[in-house]
Amino acid sequence: MINTFRAHTKIKPLLLIAAFLLPSSLLQAQTPGAMPMPEVTIYHLEGRRSERIVWLMEELGLDYELVYTRGNLGASMASIRALGHEMPMAPTVVYGDQILVESGAIIEMIMQRHAGGKLAPALDSDDFPEYQMWMHYAEGSLAARLFSDYRAWRIQPPTARSPLVDSEAVVQFAENFLADNEWFGGSVFSAADIMMLFPLNVATTLALVDVDSFPHVADWKMRVEARPAYQRMLAAARPDGMIGSLPKIEQRPPAGPR
Ligand SMILES: N[C@@H](CCC(=O)N[C@@H](CS)C(=O)NCC(=O)O)C(=O)O
């Protein structure tokens, strides 16, 4: 049976009265950068990238509907395919009358239209350029390298490190940044942390890297996973823990320089 979960923001009574009495242009002016949200439905696979969108909505206190079949990734994927979009992936988000894929782009769009400046460093701050880099690094370099190593190493276990940027190198870059910064957005938790958790969990749970070599990443994971919004995401989107995990890598390349 398809599980649909609807999360509602608690609307303060005064705001509700104001919503009826004031023109929408005036209401918008009270929250700079925030546009009214259309209905948002998140098509989800448990334990996968679609968790990012659920977590973001929970952090921002925005309404969404969540669609997946509990305990059945195949059936959840069938719901995504039934939308008829030519690129069936999780997340797929129905935003008003548009169907969207690509988690990073969906997060940036929601941030720009509906976050009113929350969950990102100020545009003119020193943190902003690196925040933006990590927003894109998560999928562009980190997840891409991890999954290409995963596929290659499953077919042929590696006997030496590649001279190209490999899994260890992409995770090491994150580790080094966290040695000097509390969060991927610099001094405050941000959407960049939401983007980075999935691939960094992939790196260690699939044994692509040795978890003990990255203590700053381990400490950061504990801090992000303790957030109440992350815990609410888990309750809504991963109620039975991780299901359908891919097999771990059995052999990593030997440690050492590339
Ligand atoms: N870069 C995309 C990747 C989306 C993606 O590959 N999602 C996986 C789940 S984590 C998926 O849909 N896999 C099913 C498939 O590839 O058929 C994003 O960030 O949204």
Image: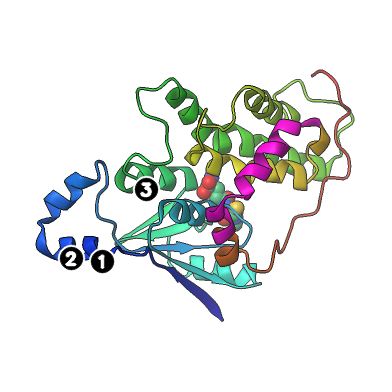
Residue assigned mark 1: 13
Vertically, is 88 above or below 251?
below
Count of numbered tags: 3
Stretch of the chain drawn in magenta: 213-232
**Which quadrant: the N terminus?**
bottom right
Residue assigned mark 3: 110
Residue assigned mark 2: 17
Q: CA distance from mark 3 to mark 1?
A: 25 Å
Question: Which residue appears at 70% of the width and 37% of the height?
Answer: 219
Query: Element at badge 2?
Result: helix
**Which quadrant: the C terminus?**
top right
| Residue 158 within the segment the image draws in magenta | no
Kindly indicate the quadrant of the structure image that contains residue 20.
bottom left
Question: Which residue appears at 83% of the width and 45% of the height?
Answer: 249
Instruction: For marks 3 and 2, give the one nearer the viewer.
Output: 2
For the view shown, which residue lies furthest in the front direction? 14
State which tag comes first along the sequence, 3 or 1: 1
Instruction: Out of 21 and 150, give the one closest to the viewer.
Output: 21
Res 86 visible: no
Q: Position of residue 45 (x, y in %)?
A: 58, 62
Q: Is mark 3 within 8 Å of ligand 1?
A: no
Q: Are marks 3 and 2 in contact (CB under 8 Å)?
A: no
**Which amino acid, mark 3?**
Ile
State which tag comes first along the sequence, 3 or 2: 2
Query: Element at badge 3?
Result: helix
**Which amino acid, mark 1?**
Pro
Q: CA distance from mark 3 to mark 2?
A: 25 Å
**Which amino acid, mark 2?**
Ile
The main secondary structure of the magenta stretch is helix
